[in-house]
Amino acid sequence: MDRTTDLAQLRKRVKDDPRSLAFVPLADALRRAGHRAEAMSVIRNGLRHHPDHATARVVLARLHLEAGNRGLAVAMLEEVVLSAPENAAAGSLLAELLVEDGRIREAAALIDRLRIVAPHDPVIQALSLRARPPTKALHGAPGDPFDRVAWADGLAARGDLPRATRAWQRIYNANAQDSRVRDRLIELSRALEGLGEVAGAGSSRHRLPGVGDAVRACLEDHDGPAPPGAGALAVWARQYWSA
């Protein structure tokens, strides 16, 4: 069934029953297809019958965001998160906007709550990396012309997880005894693995099967110098980035 058929069927369901909850997928499908004016009309009409429908309000927030009304979108998402804290879609979108606006502490607090609601959601896992404050009291290799920790955290904050993983691998080589470095590498690998599975739904070249297990076997409970296999992280990250 193609998109046109889907839209036609959803339109018919909403026309036949204006109170139908089909207005939510219809509005979102119209938004994705670029029919924003119709999507806005559908979602507003539907919300008259279902004013507290959280997912519908998230779709409306996305429409406001795409129309350039960022402040309105953020305010609406904040209301949804307050009234429906279990709604991961609202929470993750709000957290992403908070990170982009530099409201890191608020984003981090929200993501901590989301990780309880959806502990295995790869999008939330990736957001948790972007919302972390810079790591302190770590250093790069002697003589580095720049702060590698700030560089690595900056990459993660921009969502560039493959390059962030490579940067943290270099930090690990100089700080193999620090459990925080190993923990950050493990966390990055899990986020990469999750995002690889999501992206891989449409293209297998973005899959990174087994990264989480491999890095845990490589780094967990290791108290000595960087093990030989640890360099595989950089290889995986490079392959992911260049695919």
Image (spheres, rainbow, N blue to C red):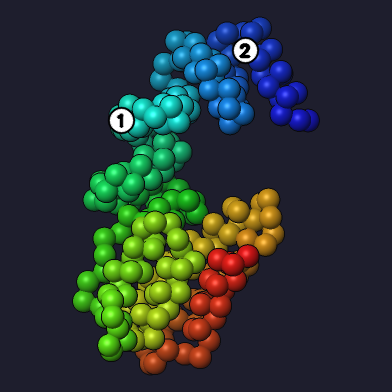
Compared with 203, 163 (above or below) is below
Residue 176 is labelled as none
The crowd level at tag 2 (other Cα within 10 Å; few <14, some 14-19, many 20+) is some
Q: Nearer the viewer, mark 2 or mark 1?
A: 1
Q: Distance between the residues labelled 2 and 1?
A: 30 Å
Residue 30 found in image quarter:
top right
Foreground of the two, 69 or 27: 69
The amino acid at mark 1 is: Gly
First-in-chain label (2 vs 1): 2
Residue 118 image position (x, y, % from top left): 45, 48
Residue 128 lies left or right of residue 27; in this view the side is left
- Residue pictured at 45% horizontal, 61% vertical: 160
Foreground of the two, 239 or 184: 239
Compared with 49, 207 (above or below) is below
| Residue named by callout 2 | 14
The amino acid at mark 2 is: Val
- Residue pictured at 39% horizontal, 86% vertical: 173
Q: Quadrant of the C terminus?
A: bottom right
Residue 182 image position (x, y, % from top left): 38, 77
Residue 232 lies left or right of residue 86; in this view the side is right
Residue 71 is labelled as 1
Residue 71 image position (x, y, % from top left): 30, 30
Foreground of the two, 54 or 43: 43
User: Secondary structure beneath disc 2?
Assistant: helix
User: Secondary structure beneath disc 1?
Assistant: helix
